[in-house]
Image (tube, grey):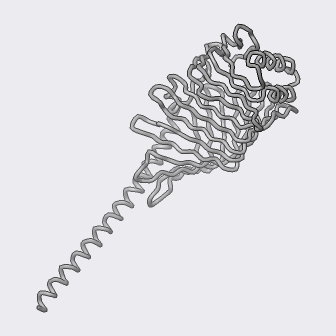
Amino acid sequence: MTPMNGATGGTSARKVWILALAIAAFLALYTVAWFFGADRLKGYVRHRLSDASVAVACTGLEVRGFPFRIGVFCDAVGIDDKRTGTSASFGALRSAAQVYRPGHAVMELDGPALVRVSPDIALTADWNLMQASAVAGTVGLERASIASNGLKGTFTADMGETKLAFLARHGETHLRANGEALDAALSLDGLELTAADTVVPKADVIVDMTIADAAGWLQDGPPINAPRRTKGDIRNLRVDFGNGNSAAVSGNFAIDDEGLLSGKFQLEISGIDALRDAVAQAFPEIADTASSIADTIRGLSGGKNARVKLRANDGVLYLGLIPIATIAAL
């Protein structure tokens, strides 16, 4: 019995050693593969940044995440698009993807941000937290999402004559390719706008729409002339001021080469008088126009809540056959 037990013990020991060697070999190969892939990714990112039509700078570029993740890290990010005269700078960037799912990446971007569009448009922004995620398939980026907390900033134009300050408690943007179209959804909670010395009442904003033939925007960004030459469907554009006062628009739209809006829409308003007073308080210069439009809508709907059809034709907004407003070129 003793020789047999010794043979059995020796066989078991060899199996344990073989298993241990196999595990060690796998870990060694995995480590080599990870660092090789990280080096290739770093080289790929550098090549894409230098070869892109839009110059992108990633200060302090590193690839981290071993052993189970892999991601690109930058101390600061800069963008320079000479085609449009646009430049932008941001804080640190951190990204990560699981090694078994490299097509799904999550990112975190620090502020502050400064965006300039020559000759006289500037946007400054900062936030408490900004995170993004992106999913890429065999044909490129398929969907992307951005979420922010405590977003605030200012927008200036016309050599500082136009100044708009904004603040949003929470915001989300979701983009998804839908065939040749692009589905876009946006929400802003607690949006506060201040134009010059005028404070617009705080509101929650929701936008849900589809832009035709715009799936490529996920890869290359919108064209220089956007939103001109675009068309699509607005499923829901809602501004909620609280206390049951809100306005919502849905319908199809088209914007021509000159930036003039055309389309057919349905407008739903809850609390016409409250919305009229809010607009008049925020923009006294159009108080009479707001009152006239409110009276017309109330007359057609018969109450403080309304549901009416609107039509836009080359930038002129009609309620039935009555022109009620002119929309500036977009």
> Is residue 47 at all visible to an observer of this figure?
yes
Furthest residue toward bottom = 2
In the image, residue 168 sits, relative to residue 118, either above or below, namely below
Furthest residue toward front = 302
Q: Is residue 227 left or right of residue 247?
A: left
State which quarter of the image contains the N terminus: bottom left
For image coordinates 69% across by 10% down, the residue present is 320
- Judge by depth and name the residue closer to the eye, 275 or 54: 275
In the image, residue 215 sits, relative to residue 325, either above or below, namely below
Q: Is residue 86 left or right of residue 180?
A: right
Q: Is residue 195 left or right of residue 53?
A: right
Q: Find residue 116 and report its image quarter.
A: top right
In the image, residue 225 sits, relative to residue 176, either above or below, namely above
In the rendered image, residue 145, in percent from the top left (x then y), is placed at 56, 41
In the rendered image, residue 296, in percent from the top left (x then y), is placed at 78, 15
In the rendered image, residue 269, in percent from the top left (x then y), is placed at 72, 26
- Judge by depth and name the residue closer to the eye, 297 or 265: 297
Q: Is residue 77 left or right of residue 12?
A: right
> Is residue 126 at all visible to an observer of this figure?
no
In the rendered image, residue 174, in percent from the top left (x then y), is placed at 57, 38
For image coordinates 82% across by 20% down, the residue present is 290
